[in-house]
Image: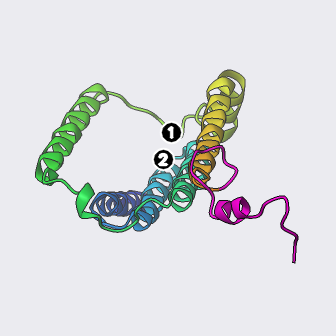
Amino acid sequence: MTGVEVLFLLLGAVAVGAALLVVSTRNLVHAALWLVVTLGAVAGCYLLLTAELVAWVQVFIYVGAVVVLLLFGLMLTRAPIGYSAEFTSGNRWVGAGVAGATAGVLVTVVGQAFQDAYIDVHAGVAGSAGAMGSAVFRFWVLPFEALSVLLLAALVGAIVLSRGGTPGAGTDQPSVAAPERAGAGAGEGER
Protein backbone atom coordinates (compact mmCIF):
# COMPACT_ATOMS: atom_id res chain seq x y z
CA MET A 1 0.00 0.00 0.00
CA THR A 2 1.18 3.47 -0.81
CA GLY A 3 1.15 6.39 1.59
CA VAL A 4 -1.78 7.96 -0.24
CA GLU A 5 -3.84 4.78 0.15
CA VAL A 6 -3.04 4.58 3.86
CA LEU A 7 -4.00 8.24 4.32
CA PHE A 8 -7.22 7.65 2.35
CA LEU A 9 -8.11 4.71 4.63
CA LEU A 10 -7.37 6.78 7.73
CA LEU A 11 -9.53 9.67 6.48
CA GLY A 12 -12.29 7.21 5.61
CA ALA A 13 -12.13 5.72 9.11
CA VAL A 14 -12.28 9.22 10.63
CA ALA A 15 -15.27 10.08 8.42
CA VAL A 16 -17.16 6.90 9.38
CA GLY A 17 -16.34 7.27 13.08
CA ALA A 18 -17.37 10.91 13.17
CA ALA A 19 -20.55 10.12 11.22
CA LEU A 20 -21.46 7.51 13.82
CA LEU A 21 -20.89 10.12 16.53
CA VAL A 22 -23.13 12.56 14.63
CA VAL A 23 -26.11 10.24 14.88
CA SER A 24 -25.36 8.84 18.33
CA THR A 25 -24.56 11.94 20.38
CA ARG A 26 -27.33 13.42 22.49
CA ASN A 27 -26.26 17.06 22.17
CA LEU A 28 -27.19 18.78 18.90
CA VAL A 29 -24.29 21.21 19.00
CA HIS A 30 -21.84 18.35 19.47
CA ALA A 31 -23.54 16.50 16.59
CA ALA A 32 -23.06 19.55 14.35
CA LEU A 33 -19.38 19.74 15.32
CA TRP A 34 -18.90 16.03 14.57
CA LEU A 35 -20.57 16.72 11.23
CA VAL A 36 -17.83 19.28 10.54
CA VAL A 37 -15.23 16.57 11.22
CA THR A 38 -17.06 14.13 8.93
CA LEU A 39 -17.36 16.61 6.07
CA GLY A 40 -13.73 17.69 6.53
CA ALA A 41 -12.56 14.08 6.28
CA VAL A 42 -14.62 13.60 3.12
CA ALA A 43 -13.03 16.76 1.68
CA GLY A 44 -9.62 15.27 2.50
CA CYS A 45 -10.60 12.12 0.59
CA TYR A 46 -11.53 14.29 -2.39
CA LEU A 47 -8.13 15.99 -2.21
CA LEU A 48 -6.40 12.62 -2.24
CA LEU A 49 -8.42 11.68 -5.33
CA THR A 50 -7.06 14.82 -7.04
CA ALA A 51 -10.50 16.45 -7.12
CA GLU A 52 -9.39 19.75 -5.64
CA LEU A 53 -12.39 21.77 -6.77
CA VAL A 54 -14.86 19.28 -5.33
CA ALA A 55 -12.88 19.25 -2.07
CA TRP A 56 -13.00 23.04 -1.75
CA VAL A 57 -16.68 23.15 -2.67
CA GLN A 58 -17.22 20.54 0.05
CA VAL A 59 -15.41 22.75 2.55
CA PHE A 60 -16.98 26.04 1.51
CA ILE A 61 -20.56 24.93 0.92
CA TYR A 62 -21.08 22.15 3.45
CA VAL A 63 -18.67 22.99 6.26
CA GLY A 64 -18.64 26.74 5.77
CA ALA A 65 -22.30 27.32 5.00
CA VAL A 66 -24.60 24.42 5.84
CA VAL A 67 -23.13 23.52 9.25
CA VAL A 68 -22.77 27.17 10.24
CA LEU A 69 -26.36 27.73 9.15
CA LEU A 70 -27.45 24.70 11.17
CA LEU A 71 -25.68 26.01 14.28
CA PHE A 72 -27.07 29.50 13.62
CA GLY A 73 -30.59 28.08 13.41
CA LEU A 74 -30.13 26.04 16.59
CA MET A 75 -28.90 29.03 18.54
CA LEU A 76 -31.54 31.45 17.26
CA THR A 77 -34.60 29.22 17.55
CA ARG A 78 -33.75 28.22 21.10
CA ALA A 79 -34.34 24.57 20.21
CA PRO A 80 -33.66 22.02 22.94
CA ILE A 81 -29.97 21.22 22.54
CA GLY A 82 -29.48 18.39 25.01
CA TYR A 83 -31.30 15.14 25.71
CA SER A 84 -35.10 15.41 25.81
CA ALA A 85 -37.17 12.38 26.86
CA GLU A 86 -40.30 13.63 25.07
CA PHE A 87 -38.54 13.57 21.67
CA THR A 88 -36.95 10.15 22.16
CA SER A 89 -38.75 7.14 20.73
CA GLY A 90 -38.09 3.47 21.27
CA ASN A 91 -37.37 2.89 17.58
CA ARG A 92 -33.61 3.26 17.78
CA TRP A 93 -32.92 -0.32 16.66
CA VAL A 94 -35.47 -0.13 13.85
CA GLY A 95 -33.79 3.06 12.64
CA ALA A 96 -30.36 1.40 12.82
CA GLY A 97 -31.68 -1.54 10.81
CA VAL A 98 -33.17 0.72 8.13
CA ALA A 99 -29.93 2.74 7.97
CA GLY A 100 -27.87 -0.45 7.63
CA ALA A 101 -30.14 -1.80 4.89
CA THR A 102 -30.00 1.51 3.02
CA ALA A 103 -26.20 1.59 3.29
CA GLY A 104 -26.02 -1.99 2.04
CA VAL A 105 -28.19 -1.19 -0.98
CA LEU A 106 -26.15 1.94 -1.76
CA VAL A 107 -22.82 0.13 -1.53
CA THR A 108 -24.11 -2.73 -3.68
CA VAL A 109 -25.58 -0.47 -6.37
CA VAL A 110 -22.54 1.81 -6.57
CA GLY A 111 -20.17 -1.17 -6.51
CA GLN A 112 -22.00 -2.88 -9.37
CA ALA A 113 -22.30 0.33 -11.36
CA PHE A 114 -18.59 1.11 -11.23
CA GLN A 115 -17.00 -2.34 -11.00
CA ASP A 116 -15.55 -2.18 -14.51
CA ALA A 117 -14.91 1.56 -14.56
CA TYR A 118 -11.36 2.81 -14.69
CA ILE A 119 -10.47 6.45 -14.41
CA ASP A 120 -6.91 7.47 -15.09
CA VAL A 121 -6.45 10.53 -12.90
CA HIS A 122 -2.98 11.22 -14.29
CA ALA A 123 -4.04 11.23 -17.96
CA GLY A 124 -4.07 14.97 -18.46
CA VAL A 125 -5.95 18.13 -17.68
CA ALA A 126 -9.48 16.72 -18.06
CA GLY A 127 -9.84 16.37 -14.28
CA SER A 128 -7.78 19.40 -13.29
CA ALA A 129 -9.14 22.22 -11.18
CA GLY A 130 -8.98 24.58 -14.17
CA ALA A 131 -11.07 22.31 -16.38
CA MET A 132 -13.54 21.61 -13.56
CA GLY A 133 -13.85 25.30 -12.72
CA SER A 134 -14.45 26.17 -16.35
CA ALA A 135 -17.16 23.50 -16.62
CA VAL A 136 -18.81 24.54 -13.37
CA PHE A 137 -18.94 28.24 -14.14
CA ARG A 138 -19.84 27.76 -17.79
CA PHE A 139 -22.46 24.99 -17.62
CA TRP A 140 -23.42 24.69 -13.95
CA VAL A 141 -23.88 28.32 -12.95
CA LEU A 142 -27.65 28.00 -12.47
CA PRO A 143 -27.45 25.16 -9.89
CA PHE A 144 -24.76 27.06 -7.97
CA GLU A 145 -26.91 30.20 -7.92
CA ALA A 146 -29.99 28.17 -6.94
CA LEU A 147 -28.00 26.74 -4.04
CA SER A 148 -26.99 30.22 -2.91
CA VAL A 149 -30.64 31.38 -3.01
CA LEU A 150 -31.64 28.27 -1.05
CA LEU A 151 -29.04 28.98 1.63
CA LEU A 152 -30.15 32.60 1.81
CA ALA A 153 -33.79 31.54 2.20
CA ALA A 154 -32.81 29.14 5.00
CA LEU A 155 -30.91 31.93 6.76
CA VAL A 156 -33.85 34.32 6.47
CA GLY A 157 -36.18 31.56 7.71
CA ALA A 158 -33.97 30.97 10.75
CA ILE A 159 -34.02 34.67 11.56
CA VAL A 160 -37.81 34.85 11.19
CA LEU A 161 -38.28 31.79 13.41
CA SER A 162 -35.98 33.23 16.06
CA ARG A 163 -37.85 36.54 16.18
CA GLY A 164 -41.29 34.90 16.46
CA GLY A 165 -41.89 35.84 20.11
CA THR A 166 -40.23 39.26 20.20
CA PRO A 167 -42.18 42.52 20.38
CA GLY A 168 -42.96 44.09 17.04
CA ALA A 169 -42.46 40.88 15.11
CA GLY A 170 -46.05 40.82 13.91
CA THR A 171 -47.26 38.07 16.24
CA ASP A 172 -50.33 38.07 18.44
CA GLN A 173 -48.28 37.49 21.57
CA PRO A 174 -48.29 40.46 23.95
CA SER A 175 -44.97 42.06 24.64
CA VAL A 176 -43.44 42.30 28.10
CA ALA A 177 -43.82 46.08 28.23
CA ALA A 178 -47.48 46.07 27.08
CA PRO A 179 -49.07 46.23 30.60
CA GLU A 180 -46.88 49.19 31.55
CA ARG A 181 -47.88 51.11 28.43
CA ALA A 182 -51.54 50.26 28.92
CA GLY A 183 -51.60 51.83 32.41
CA ALA A 184 -50.13 55.11 31.28
CA GLY A 185 -53.10 57.18 30.13
CA ALA A 186 -53.24 60.52 28.38
CA GLY A 187 -53.66 62.40 31.67
CA GLU A 188 -50.66 60.93 33.41
CA GLY A 189 -47.46 62.92 33.19
CA GLU A 190 -43.97 61.62 32.90
CA ARG A 191 -41.76 61.66 35.94
Disc 2 residue crowd, few under 14, some 14–19, many 20+, Cα 10 Å:
some
Q: Main secondary structure of the magenta part?
A: loop
- Asked whether, in this view, residue 183 is left or right of residue 127, the answer is right
The x, y position of residue 89, in whole percent, is: 18, 53
Q: Nearer the viewer, residue 149 or 99?
A: 149
Instruction: Tell me the residue that label 1 is attached to.
Output: 121
Q: Is residue 157 above or below residue 149?
A: below
Q: Which range is magenta? A: 167-191
Q: Nearer the viewer, residue 174 or 72?
A: 174
Q: Quadrant of the C terminus?
A: bottom right
Check contact, mark 1 vs mark 2: CB within 8 A. yes
Secondary structure under badge 2? loop
| Residue lying farthest to the top in this orientation | 139
Closer to the N terminus: mark 1 or mark 2?
Answer: 2
- Look at the image and tell me whether residue 132 can be seen: no
Q: Residue type at mark 1: give it.
A: Val
Secondary structure under badge 1? loop
Picture quadrant of residue 20: bottom left
Q: Residue type at mark 2: give it.
A: Leu
- Asked whether, in this view, residue 121 is left or right of residue 52, the answer is left
Q: Nearer the viewer, residue 163 or 178?
A: 178
Instruction: Tell me the residue that label 2 is attached to.
Output: 49
Residue at x 76%, y 64% (from the top left corner): 184
Q: Does residue 178 belong to the magenta stretch?
A: yes
| Residue lying farthest to the front in this orientation | 187
Q: Does residue 97 belong to the magenta stretch?
A: no
Q: Nearer the viewer, residue 147 or 116?
A: 147
Closer to the camera: disc 1 or disc 2?
A: 2
